[in-house]
C-alpha cells in the first residue's frame, strides 16, 4: 500500500468515527477491550466501510518496517499464519511437534519429532534429537549398564559411569560392568585387588579393602598384615573376645571354647617305677610348674676291701621350669633310675640307670687288680608325644678302683649328658656314654701298690629347662628347693668292695 493510500484511509476512518460518536448518546465501553493492555484485539477493531481500501496492519508489532504480504508479525518475527508450526492460524498457537497447513495443526509430525505415546492430543510430543528414551526414533532408548547416556542429534553417546561403577574391561557395549564398591579384584578402582589374610575372608566395602575373621578368630593386635591372628577359643589373654584375659597373677587360668576356666591349685609327685607314666592337665589349667631331679650314679668297685678305692657316684642334675599346656592334654613322665655299682672284679661293670644311664668301664683283656666303674644315673624327663619338654640328667658313675704303679686309676663319668668316663690304663675300657643320663665311670687301672679310688662320679648330665643345676659331688642339684626330698638323685657313696647303686630321681608337677 502506498503512503498516499494509507493517509486517505486514516482520514476517512477518523471522519467516520467522529460522525458516528456525534450522533446520539456517548459510546458504552466494550467488554472486549482490555484496559490492562491498552489495546484491542483484531476482532475488536470496528469494521471499516467497504469503500475504504487498505491492507490489515501487523497485529503485535515489533517487526521494524513491517512484514511481507501474507505474513504477520508475532513476537517480533514475521510468520505465515497458514503454515508456521509456531504460530498456526494466530500468534501464540503452536503445533506440538506437528506441521501447520491452512492455518490449522495437522497430525503429521515435523522432522525430528515423533508421536511416541500414540496420543495425537498432545501431538508429536518427543524431540527425537535429544530424548534418551526415544533417540532418533520412538522406543530407541539410550541404555548402557550402570552408565549415563545422552542423545545428541538423534544418536546415543556414553556420558560416564554411575557412582560406584567403572568400565574395567574397556568394553563399551556392556557399559560399566564392574561394581568397584564391592569387587574384590577392583576395589575402589580398576585392578586394585584385596589381599587374603590369615584366618579371614577378604571383603571390599564401599571401595575399601578389609577382611572378616573366621569363626573363633579375631584381629586383637590391630595389624592387618597378619589377619585374624588370635584364636579366641583357646587364648588365655583373649578368651571369647579381644582383651578378655583368663590369666591371674599366679599365671593360672585357661580358655576352653571361648570361656575362661578356673584352675584349682594342686600337685602330683612322681617317683621311680621303671616305666613311663601319664599326667593329664587338669581342667582350666593353662600352665604347670615342673621340678625334676635326675638319678644318682653308681659307685665304682674295688679289688681291695681294706680301703674304699672305688669312686662315689655323682649326684643327678636338677631343673625347674614352667610349661604352657592345654587343659585335658596328656604328657608322658619318666623318673630316672640310679646307676648300678661297679664290681670288685674287672668285669662286669655297673649297669646304667633306667632312662639313659651309661654302663661303667671295665679292665680289658682279663687283667687283674682293677675294679669296674659304676653306671651312670638315668635322666628324669617330661615330654609331649616324642618332644622333650623337661630333662634332668643323671649323675655320672664312679670310677673303678685298683692298684697304682706306673698307671692311673679310672676316671668318673663325664659332666655332660651321655659322656662316658675315661680309662685308668691302656688296657682298661672307658665307661660307655649315656643316651640321656650320666655316663658310666671308667675302669680301674692295674698296679702293685694299693691306693684310694679314682674319686667321685661325674656331675649330673646336662639338663633342659629354664633353671637348672648340676649335681655337686654325691649331692644332686636343687637340694634347697622346697619340693626336694632326700635322698632323691644322690650318688652312691664310695665303699670298699663292690660299688652300691645310686638313688633314683624325682619329679613334682604343680598347677
Image: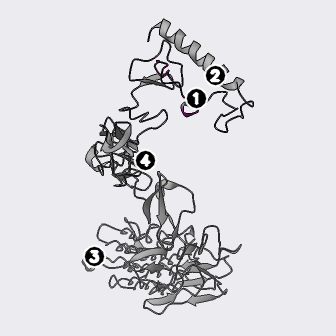
Q: Residue at x 45, y 71 (%)?
A: 412
Q: Earlier in the sequence, mark 2 or mark 1?
A: 2
Q: Nearer the viewer, mark 4 or mark 2?
A: 2
State yes or no: discs 2 and 1 in contact (Cβ < 8 Å): yes
Tell me the magenta residue range: 43-58
The x and y percentages for residue 366 are: 26, 80
Distance from Cα at disc 3 to Cα at disc 2: 168 Å
- Binning the other alpha carbons within 10 Å of mark 1 as few (below 14), some (14 to 19) or many (20 upward) gives few
Q: Which mark is residue 17?
A: 2
Task: Residue at 59% x, 89% y: name it.
Answer: 268
- Mark 2: secondary structure: helix
Point out the image quarter for the N terminus. Answer: top left
Element type where label 3 sits in the image:
helix
If you read the primary sequence from the N terminus, does the residue marked by circle 3 or circle 2 appear first? Answer: 2
Residue 423 in the image, given as x and y percentages of width and height: 36, 69
- Which one is in front, 101 or 506? 101
Q: Is residue 313 left or right of residue 151?
A: right
* 24 lies above or below 131: above
Nearer the observer: mark 3 or 4; the answer is 4
The vertical placement of 91 against 288, above or below, is above
Q: Which mark is residue 162?
A: 4
Q: Earlier in the sequence, mark 4 or mark 1?
A: 1
Q: CA distance from mark 4 to mark 2?
A: 72 Å
Q: Where residue 427 sits: x, y (%)?
A: 29, 70
Helix, strand or loop at label 1? It is loop
Mark 3 in CB contact with mark 4 (< 8 angstroms): no
Q: Are marks 1 and 3 in contact (CB under 8 Å)?
A: no
Which residue in the structure is indicated by mark 1?
46
Tell me the CA gap for discs 4 and 1. 64 Å
Tell me the distance, in whole angstroms, between the alpha carbons under discs 2 and 1: 9 Å
Residue matched to label 3: 364
Q: Select label 1 or label 3 by which is in front.
A: 1
Amino acid at each position: 500500500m502506498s503512503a498516499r493510500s494509507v493517509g486517505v484511509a486514516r482520514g476517512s476512518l477518523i471522519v467516520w468515527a467522529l460522525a458516528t460518536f456525534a450522533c446520539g448518546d456517548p459510546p458504552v465501553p466494550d467488554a472486549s477491550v482490555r484496559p490492562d493492555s491498552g489495546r484491542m484485539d483484531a476482532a475488536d477493531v470496528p469494521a471499516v466501510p467497504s469503500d475504504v481500501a487498505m491492507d490489515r496492519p501487523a497485529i503485535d508489532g515489533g517487526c521494524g518496517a513491517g512484514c511481507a504480504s501474507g505474513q504477520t508479525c508475532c513476537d517480533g518475527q514475521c510468520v505465515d499464519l497458514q503454515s508456521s508450526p509456531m504460530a498456526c492460524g494466530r500468534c501464540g498457537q503452536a503445533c506440538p511437534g506437528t506441521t501447520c497447513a491452512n492455518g490449522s495443526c495437522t497430525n503429521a509430525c515435523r522432522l525430528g519429532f515423533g508421536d511416541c505415546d500414540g496420543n495425537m492430543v498432545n501431538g508429536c510430543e518427543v524431540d527425537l534429537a535429544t530424548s534418551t528414551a526415544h533417540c532418533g526414533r520412538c522406543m530407541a532408548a539410550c541404555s548402557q549398564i550402570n552408565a549415563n547416556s545422552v542423545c545428541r542429534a538423534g544418536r546415543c553417546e556414553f556420558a560416564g559411569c554411575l557412582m560406584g561403577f567403572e568400565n574395567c574391561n574397556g568394553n563399551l557395549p556392556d557399559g560399566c560392568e564392574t561394581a568397584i564398591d564391592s569387587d574384590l579384584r577392583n576395589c575402589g578402582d580398576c585392578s586394585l585387588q584385596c589381599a587374603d589374610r590369615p584366618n579371614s575372608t577378604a571383603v571390599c566395602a564401599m571401595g575399601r579393602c578389609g577382611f572378616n575373621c573366621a569363626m573363633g578368630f579375631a584381629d586383637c593386635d590391630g595389624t592387618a598384615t597378619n589377619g585374624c591372628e588370635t584364636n579366641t577359643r583357646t587364648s588365655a589373654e583373649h578368651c571369647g573376645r579381644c582383651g578378655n584375659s583368663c590369666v591371674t597373677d599366679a599365671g593360672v587360668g585357661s580358655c576352653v571354647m571361648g570361656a575362661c576356666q578356673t584352675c584349682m591349685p594342686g600337685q602330683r609327685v612322681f617317683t621311680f617305677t621303671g616305666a613311663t607314666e601319664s599326667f593329664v592337665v587338669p581342667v582350666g589349667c593353662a600352665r604347670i610348674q615342673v621340678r625334676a631331679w635326675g638319678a644318682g650314679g653308681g659307685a665304682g668297685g674295688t679289688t681291695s676291701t681294706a680301703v674304699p678305692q672305688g669312686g662315689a657316684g655323682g649326684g643327678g642334675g636338677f631343673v625347674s621350669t614352667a610349661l604352657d599346656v592345654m587343659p585335658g592334654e596328656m604328657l608322658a613322665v619318666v623318673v630316672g633310675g640310679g646307676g648300678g655299682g661297679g664290681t670288685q672284679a674287672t668285669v662286669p661293670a655297673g649297669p646304667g640307670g633306667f632312662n639313659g644311664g651309661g654302663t661303667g668301664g671295665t679292665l680289658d683283656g682279663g687283667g687283674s687288680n682293677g675294679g669296674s666303674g659304676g653306671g651312670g644315673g638315668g635322666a628324669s624327663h617330661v615330654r609331649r608325644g616324642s618332644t622333650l619338654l623337661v630333662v634332668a640328667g643323671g649323675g655320672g658313675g664312679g670310677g673303678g678302683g685298683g692298684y697304682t704303679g706306673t698307671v692311673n686309676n679310672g676316671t668318673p663319668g663325664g659332666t655332660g649328658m651321655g659322656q662316658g668316663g675315661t680309662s685308668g690304663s691302656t688296657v682298661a675300657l672307658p665307661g660307655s656314654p649315656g643316651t640321656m643320663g650320666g655316663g658310666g665311670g671308667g675302669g680301674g687301672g692295674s698296679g702293685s701298690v694299693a691306693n684310694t679310688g679314682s674319686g667321685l662320679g661325674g656331675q649330673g648330665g646336662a639338663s633342659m629347662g629354664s633353671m637348672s643345676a648340676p649335681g655337686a659331688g654325691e649331692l644332686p642339684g636343687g637340694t634347697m628347693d622346697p619340693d626336694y626330698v632326700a635322698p632323691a638323685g644322690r650318688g652312691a657313696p664310695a665303699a670298699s668292695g663292690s660299688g652300691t647303686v645310686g638313688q633314683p630321681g624325682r619329679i613334682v608337677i604343680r598347677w
